[in-house]
Amino acid sequence: MKLTTSRVVAFIVTPLLTLVAGGIATVGAKYGLHVNATDVTVDGVAVATAVTGLAIKWLSGNSTYERLVLSLEHELKLVTAADPTAVAGVEHAVEWAAAKSVEKAEEAIGAPADAFPPAPTDTVVVPVAPAPAA
């Protein structure tokens, strides 16, 4: 297992947040809150459990992502080694398909795509509430 920055962060966050929860309870008890040892223990266990669960879930997703990236990088190396022009060929095929899609759209609407003004980029979409039932 490779020790990456993301894994180090996940392993450090769990005990750190548990200590923070205990520290909050301790400070609260010192400054007037009536907190007994059982409450502090329960809070600490609850926080540790929640944070550990989140860290494990995040590490699982991150591990899946890292495996996928490594697999795709390996496959790209194999394809490139077998045919150095393969990547350029795929890029060309994608550009050709996009150009054909634009041509079909132009034929369907009867005008070239550049005849229409560009869509505004500063538009804000405001959700509209449903009409009240009468």
Image (tube, rainbow, N blue to C red):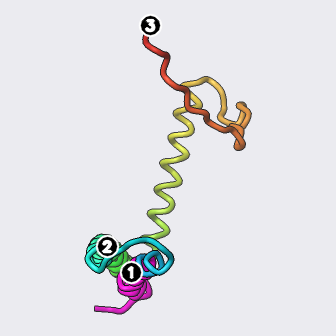
Badge 1 density bin: few <14, some 14–19, many ≥20, Cα 10 Å:
many
Badge 3 density bin: few <14, some 14–19, many ≥20, Cα 10 Å:
few
Give the percent coordinates (x, y) of residue 9.
42, 84
Please tell me the numbered disc located at residue 99.
Answer: none
**1 or 3: mark nearer the eye:** 1
Q: Is residue 23 located in the magenta-colored stretch of the structure?
A: yes
Give the percent coordinates (x, y) of residue 132.
47, 15
Specify whether 114 is left or right of 38: right
CA distance separating discs 2 and 1: 7 Å
Q: Secondary structure at mark 3?
A: loop
Give the percent coordinates (x, y) of residue 114.
70, 36
Q: Is residue 68 visible?
A: no
- Of residue 112 and residue 12, the one placed in the foreground of this image is 12
* Residue type, mark 1 in image: Gly
Q: Sequence order check: which comes first, mark 2 or mark 3?
A: 2
Q: Sequence order check: which comes first, mark 1 or mark 3?
A: 1
**Which residue is pictured at 34% across the width and 72% down the height?**
58
Q: Is residue 125 visible?
A: yes
Q: Sequence order check: which comes first, mark 2 or mark 1?
A: 1
Report the quarter where the C terminus lies: top left
Specify the principal SS of the magenta part: helix
Q: Determine which residue is flagged by label 2.
A: 43
| Cβ atoms at labels 1 and 3 below 8 Å apart | no
Q: Determine which residue is flagged by label 3.
A: 134
- Of residue 3 and residue 23, the one placed in the foreground of this image is 23
- Of residue 105 and residue 5, the one placed in the foreground of this image is 5
* Residue type, mark 2 in image: Asp
Q: Determine which residue is flagged by label 1.
A: 22
User: What range of the chain is rendered magenta?
Assistant: 1-24
CA distance separating discs 2 and 3: 48 Å
* Residue type, mark 3 in image: Ala
Badge 2 density bin: few <14, some 14–19, many ≥20, Cα 10 Å:
some
